[in-house]
Amino acid sequence: MRNILTPSWFSPSRLFPMLLLVMLVILAACGIAPPPPDKTVYIVSETGTVYAVKGTDGSMLWQHHMAGDNGSVWGASSGLALVNGIIYTSSSVDGGYVYAFRARDGMVLWHTRIHPEGTPSAPVLVNGVIYVAVADPSLTSSNVYALKAADGAVLWHSHIKGCGSSPRVVNNTLYLSADACSSPPDVAQQGYVYALDASSGSLRWRYQAVDSFISQVVVLNNIAYADEISGTIDAIHANNGSLLWQHRVQRRQLSAVAGVNDSLYVSAAGFLYAFRASDGAQLWKVHVGDHGPYEPTVIGNTIYAASPLEENIYALQTRDGASLWTYQAQNYFAGAEPIVVDGVLYFSMNDGAIYALTSNDGAQIYRYDTPGRKLVTSSSLAVGP
């Protein structure tokens, strides 16, 4: 029989992880949240300032006001991406700009002006290329750009109708929706789903929706999905843009479409729906609350749903919509997609705070008060070392 007390087995290097695991189990059993993780939270404000916040205590590590680079006091951003220690984001001051920051200290690596006027979408990085759409001030057309992530050099750009969303790139094809972003919309303007060659920007196909407003595109198993404001879900063949099926839910609110494997999730008023992605068959429907729409975000086997009209964050099972937990925050949801890193759920609220919960049970780990209510709004956040 092996002697487990020999120095080779019962050593400090083995003992510490065992004690840490025991402590976490005891804390969970007592309902006590673990200490804040040693991470950095990166966020960008609607006024064009990038912030790095220390995860352990919420202190500011660095900040950079992108609008200030051009002598302006105003700017805007739609979100950021963190890849390999570099933050990629956008600013609308004096036109559309894309920036690259070194995450550890906020040093600007490069910034490129991609359009004389307009508001850029959140950038997307795929295989060393950044893709971003910039809506023109006319709110009737957009330009889609591809830039080298290494230095910001523009590789190509394409002109499309409508106000372009943040792109999705799958198998060297760039998909994005473009709609009438004016309010009320021009009745003559309709929403579109575009497929462009990701290498050249050339048009592969364009699908014309019935409504003026359409959600961002989700691509699963060679099918592109988008949700129209009337409640119509469009399933479009990713190769040629032909319509495969449509499904209608009763509502007049636009919902984000979330998808994983062979399931789609959308919101309608106070309900969440799950549909089979291959043919649109309804899998389940659950009542979440009375203040929808509840924007779904799928991470693993969990749907995280929140509404800009309500304080609660909901966690549900993807399999059947069963409730896992509900967290009541102190203000309304800001609209940025929640993210999960190492078992911690991060999101922002309209009170200008960043929240962190244990993703399995919704216990609050911490809440960070940020410098102002305009800090996080609907822009995305990122978490890194």
Image (spheres, rainbow, N blue to C red):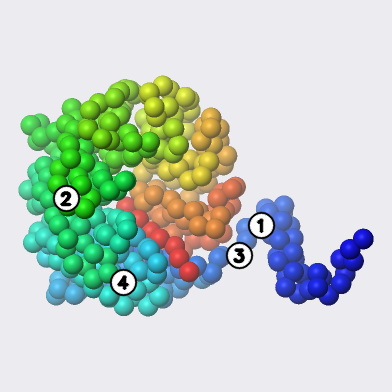
Q: CA distance from mark 2 to mark 4?
A: 26 Å
Q: Is residue 206 above or below residue 35?
A: above
* Amino acid bearing label 3: Pro
- Identify the residue shown where x is 60% and y is 65%: 35
Cα distance in 3D space between marks 3 and 4? 29 Å
Label 2 vs 4, first from the N-terminus: 4
Identify which amino acid the numbered label 1 is placed on: Ile
Residue contact between numbered discs 3 and 4, judged by CB atoms under 8 Å: no
Name the residue carrying label 1: 32
Q: What residue would you read off at disc 3?
A: 35
The residue lying at 76 percent from left, 74 percent from top is 12
Of the numbered discs 3 and 2, the one sitting upstream in the chain is 3
The reply to whether discs 2 and 4 touch (Cβ–Cβ < 8 Å) is no
> Dot 4: what SS?
strand
Q: Mark 4 highlights which residue?
A: 101
The mark closer to the camera, 3 or 2, is 2
> Which callout, 1 or 4, points at the residue further toward the start of the chain?
1
For the N terminus, which image quadrant?
bottom right
Is 209 displayed left or right of 384 in the figure? left
**Spatial distance from mark 3 to mark 1, Cα to Cα?**
9 Å
Residue 188 falls left or right of residue 314: left
Disc nearest the viewer among 3 and 4:
4
